[in-house]
Image: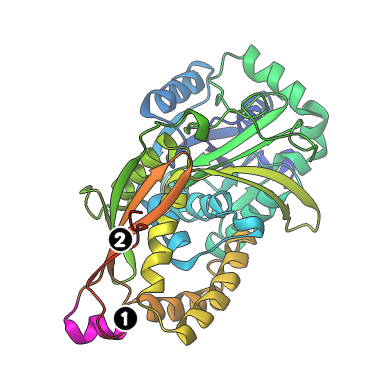
Amino acid sequence: MIIEDLAAQRVGVVQGGGLSSLALGLWLRERGVDAHHYVADIGQGGPDDLAALVDSLRGAGLPATLVDLRPAMAELGLDLLRYQARHDGGYWNTTGASRLVLVERLAPVLRADGRTVLAHGCVGGGNDQRRFARYGARLAPDLGVYAPWIDPAALARFPNRAAMYAAVTGAGLWLDPGSDADRSTDANLAGASHESTELEDLATPVAPKTLAPRWSAWPADAPADGGSVTVTIEAGRVTDVDGQGPDPVAVLTAANTLGATHGSWLRDVVERRIIGTRCRGVYEAPGLEVLDVAWHKALEVTLDPYSRTLYEQLAGALGAAVYEARYRDPVAAAARAALDALTGSVSATVELTLRGGAVTAAGVHTPGGDADRQTRFGTGGHQWRNLAPAAA
């Protein structure tokens, strides 16, 4: 679609407060398009930030509605953990997962409001533009999808991020603190993706002067005395983090706070994009990094070797599906069903210690009687396995 195609349409803008999506809003306003902004709360910021974004949009004459999608984002974020749905270098696929949540959960809202087109501000020809296109076609074929940065007229108006930045700041719009003319941050409850002109140079170190973490402390700045946490896993799902209860938002929020506080969050990855190029991204997922240690320890004490081999093969297939926006395809559904069958018996309580960016398992408790314990740990095994090194 190009701008002329929107003359008789009612457009719903997927809005998160990033530079390019705000520039999209200004572009549509300039061209007189009937557009409404849906500010999706997927855990990218606090309530004050999102309220400021909504107020600034409305103040600029851009109608806006806040939509809480945190439960869906948290549930899918924990599925990334359960299915080990990673991409190159162990990247947790948090951005790709958020595109599914945005299309799948906002499409019904747009329809209910009489919107006929979904518009997003993702870079033309990039990973996320392809993801919106694929999920739009599969999950909302009745809605058109407008990607402005493949529209020649929109590109002529905003040829680069510097032009976007000048327009957005000039309009007084609230801009995500991780975005400006040279850098961008895409965040949600599961994690944040950091990109910048400086980080595109592989020789640039990931350090405080080149990266501002979204939430997290650098390991050197973490509390010297460290901390501990107990993670409960039941029937293949994380159901509690230190007494927070089973709600996925509470689980992921508690894990994020712990990982961020103790400096457990960072992955520096050179990844293969959908379009065939390679790029560098720095990824911040403090909660998933913490929970991952507990999850792997639970797998070690519950799955037999043959199940574990199949699990890892299927996890790779699902990681690719999330990255490439094929999570709702039949092959991904089949992989999830098989992984559900493999992990349905994974139940354990894992105690973790956190210090200086490192997360280690200190002990594992599994349910069951003596026979079950002997099967898991061998003859003479114990229901509570202390994994900490013995004192000298």
Q: Position of residue 113 (x, y in %)?
A: 43, 43
Q: Position of residue 366 (x, y in %)?
A: 25, 71
Q: Residues within 10 Å of mark 1 (few under 14, many from 20)?
A: some
Report the magenta stretch's main SS. Answer: helix
Q: Is residue 265 above or below residue 173?
A: below
- Amino acid at circle 1: Arg
**Residue 111, image x, y percentages:** 46, 50
- Image quadrant assignment for residue 186: top right
- Label 1: which residue? 376
Count up the numbered dots: 2
**Range shown magenta:** 368-375
Q: Amino acid at mark 2?
A: Gly
**What residue is shown at x 74% (from left), y 27% (from top)?**
161
Residue 248 visible in the shown view: yes
Q: Is residue 3 magenta?
A: no
In the displayed structure image, the side of residue 239 where residue 103 appears, left or right: right
Q: Which quadrant is home to the C terminus?
A: bottom left
Q: Which residue is mark 2?
A: 363
